[in-house]
Image (tube, rainbow, N blue to C red):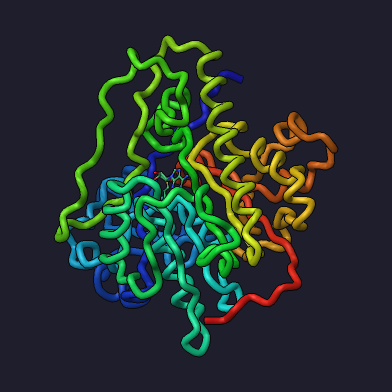
Amino acid sequence: AGVAARRWPHPRWVRVNTIKTSLDEQLRTTFAGYKHSSSLEQLLDVTTSRTEKLLHIDKHIPNLLALPPLTDVSKTPAYTNGLIIFQDKASCFPAYLLDVKPEDGNCMDACAAPGNKTTHLAAIADQRGVGGSKPQIYACERDKTRALTLQQMVRIAGAENHVTIKAGQDFLRMESSQPPSDGVGALLLDPSCSGSGIVGRDEVSEVILPRSELTYVPQSRSKKRKRKAPVEASQPIVETPVVPEETPLNGDDSSDRLSTRLAALSAFQLKLLLHAFEFPKARKITYSTCSVYLQENEHVVTKALESPIAKKRGWRILQRDQQISGMKAWEIRGNSQACREVSETGDVDQVAEACIRCEKGTKEGTQGFFVAAFIRDGKEQVPQK
Ligand code: SAM
């Protein structure tokens, strides 16, 4: 008793962009001379990693590497030319779990900027293309300034042939029965969230949602909104956490205020997910947040599954044993008590087991994160491009 859990340092995660290169090529070039560490724990051991060039090949996500926290590869040509991309391991889960295949037809990234998951999805789609038939990805981003960053990221990643950017497009205003929505078979939904799982942030301090969706936030407490300038064409793109759209709450904020904000976020996230359920050709969806809060995660998933539209369309959660290998093997799963709290049926054990959680500060080296996938069978044929 009384022994505090060790807080592990956060590794630098590097995704090899298979649109432009391969893992083998990067190991031979950018990472020539790096010693392979079979365990992430060894890599995170400061005494070892300060003296040696180390890397660890991730065992869950293909083409993902971990480097010790102090390693800087941001000046390498591989980074500046988009051959490698800085992306937290957990942030690679949604596109991998979506597991797109040519028969899925087109895809949509509903909340896309700055574009880490869009470019990852594009890389997977690129690898999976059969006979030249590659899914087209529509990347929808409501905020035009953030869409500029998305555009840069897609260009640097060499994903322009796969991605059509819908800049300034509100996903909720995309009519599901009209083109291009009516041809979309797979959606990745990674909406604005509290950002409470992001490393370096205080779990109770952030809300990242436009003021228009949080109209009750007293204006007097809000400082002027800070936006990042669009990235210069020559500038590489570092994984950009969500640009804060609200001033963080202060330490003296009441839990009432926090729960009111979380309720608003949760309602907004559920609305987006239920809109995705409406897409007529959709057969798979991933829902994710970089939040640690149950309200934004298990609560949203459970309510969505028990919604009339889910029942009408036959949406169900993708069970753990049906998940792609790396995700099936991931041990940290959802919280069944949280699912039960909001469930009307109480039939939630398999739901929690199907949900994937990541915790920050652990030896897994991830940020705090949540993802779940939904699937349904459908009789309609998905049009091939
Ligand atoms: N998926 C991104 C990535 O991995 O780089 C991060 C997405 S961030 C968590 C959420 C994004 O959704 C923000 O850029 C926000 O502007 C956008 N957004 C929020 N509501 C939206 C809506 N209704 N339609 C389209 N985009 C929206």
Question: Residue at position x 69%, y 44% from top?
Answer: 304
Q: Residue at x 40, y 28 (%)?
A: 211
Residue 156 placement, left or right of 271: left
Q: Residue furthest bottom?
A: 131
Q: Is residue 324 left or right of residue 41?
A: right
In the image, residue 60 above or below residue 30: above
**Is 83 in front, or is 57?**
83
**Whether residue 54 can be seen here:** yes
> Is 319 positioned to the left or the right of 20 in the image?
right
Residue drawn at the location 56% of the way across and 66% of the way down: 184
Q: Position of residue 12 (x, y in %)?
A: 34, 50
Q: Is residue 167 left or right of residue 307?
A: left
What is the quadrant of the N terminus in the image? Answer: top right
The quadrant holding residue 252 is top left
Residue 41 visible, this angle: no
Residue 334, compared with residue 267, is above or below; it is below
Question: Which residue is at 35% across, 43% downward?
Answer: 241
Task: Give how far across and how far down residue 185 sits, in percent.
Answer: 60, 67
Instruction: Give the x, y percent position of residue 11.
Output: 37, 48
Q: How many marks?
A: 0
